[in-house]
Amino acid sequence: MSAPPNPKPFKLLGILDVENIPCARDSILYGSLGSVVAGLGHFLLTSRIRRSCDVGVGGFIVVTLGCWFHCRYNYAKLRIQERLAREGIKNKILYESTHLDPARKQTNGGGSSN
């Protein structure tokens, strides 16, 4: 018995593809942990069940969005750094051993003027 060739991806609420969207899995996991901590903490302090559930939902939303934006910001920074590194490598390969090579200008320009 072999596995199906294309397993169906896990989608949260039918819309959020947790496997393929960067940062989605971590944000959901941290949000659920934040929900439990906020709701349980509020319940232990006040013993109000309905209000504690509301605080738990609010904690989920705040922590999920906070983790999401933090992770996406870092992901975007990483993508920009990768793109700059790729362009730098491409230029290094393109201009190496030509008169346009910046490394060659630095070594040739530092000679003595006799």
Image: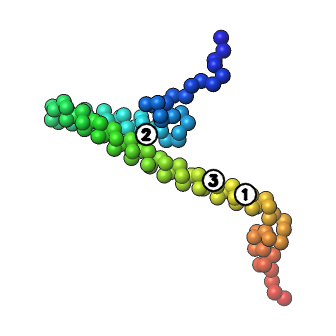
Residue 62 on image: x %, y %? 34, 44
- What is the distance, in whole Å, between disc 2 and disc 1 at their CAs? 34 Å
Residue 31 located left or right of residue 72: left
N-term-proximal mark, 1 vs 3 = 3
Which residue is situated farthest in the top direction here? 1
In the rendered view, would you say 99 is above or below 23?
A: below
Residue 21 on image: x %, y %? 53, 39
Q: Amino acid at mark 3?
A: Glu
Residue toward you, 110 or 93? 93
Residue 68 is marked as none
Residue 42 on image: x %, y %? 21, 36
Residue assigned mark 3: 82
Which residue is situated farthest in the bottom direction here? 114
Which residue is situated farthest in the front direction here? 14
Q: Quadrant of residue 68?
A: top left
User: Which residue is rendered at x = 30% and y = 33% of the image?
Assistant: 36
Q: Amino acid at mark 1?
A: Ile
Bin the neighbour count of mark 1 within 10 Å (Cα to Cα): few under 14, some 14-19, many 20 and up.
Answer: few
Looking at the rendered structure, the secondary structure element under dot 3 is helix
Bin the neighbour count of mark 2 within 10 Å (Cα to Cα): few under 14, some 14-19, many 20 and up.
Answer: many
User: Which residue is rendered at x = 70% and y = 60% of the image?
Assistant: 88
Residue assigned mark 1: 89
Residue assigned mark 2: 27
Q: Would residue 58 be seen by someone viewing this image from the given angle?
A: yes
Residue 27 located left or right of residue 91: left
Give the quadrant of the C terminus.
bottom right
- What is the distance, in whole Å, between disc 3 and disc 2 at their CAs? 23 Å
Residue 40 on image: x %, y %? 25, 32
Image marks 2 and 1: residues in contact by CB distance under 8 Å? no
Q: Quadrant of residue 87?
A: bottom right
Q: Amino acid at mark 2?
A: Ser
